[in-house]
Image: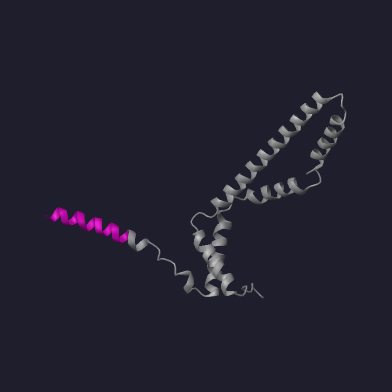
Amino acid sequence: MKRFSVGVAMALGGALSAFAQTPPAPAPVESLSCEQMYAEVMTAGQTMSRQLDPSVGAQAQDRLRQATGPGAYAAAAADQARLSALCSNPLTPAACKAAQSEFVARQQAAAAASQQQMADLHAKVQASTAGIDMERMQAIQTRIDKERCPQPKGPGG
């Protein structure tokens, strides 16, 4: 009987230890002041910043440059001009069709590469939210908007 008691005591001790380490449930969003809500959002933002892959900023800048830079539409415009010239000649229908197919294939490949780059960036940003209750963050933001909470003043503001 004593053996059973020691085993039960050890099991209960382990359960109590695990229970003691469980963080308390956060206060309901409806009960938070504006200051508390902003503090929670700031803490979550700092967590995301610490967890964010450092390459994300550079990758996002590259994507922006690709989409809006001077060469963004130059290649497509040159292809369009080439197609217009080639396809306006009634003697070159086969060459026109081949050039159109090549153009479409290049555009599809570029779109697929762009989608993959965006998916990679999205996955890295999603990974930075690990451990953050995003539903709670959304509820807090909704309540901040509803309550028209004033923006907190920064240091020295």
Residue 10 part of the magenta segment: yes
Quadrant of the image containing the N terminus: bottom left
| Left or right relative to 20: residue 114 | right
- Which percent across, then down, holds residue 91? 87, 24
When asked about the image quadrant of residue 149, the answer is bottom right
Quadrant of the image containing the C terminus: bottom right
Looking at the picture, tell me which residue is in the foreground, 12 or 60.
Answer: 60
Residue reaching furthest to the left: 1
Where 119 sits versus 79, above or below? Answer: below
Where 1 sits versus 109, above or below? Answer: below
| Left or right relative to 1: residue 76 | right
- Which percent across, then down, holds residue 38? 56, 70
* Count of marks placed on residues: 0
- Which percent across, then down, holds residue 124? 58, 49
Residue 131 part of the magenta segment: no
Where 104 sits versus 59, above or below? Answer: above
Looking at the picture, tell me which residue is in the foreground, 78 or 98.
Answer: 98
| Residue at 67%, 42% in the rendered image | 114
Q: Which residues are magenta?
A: 1-17
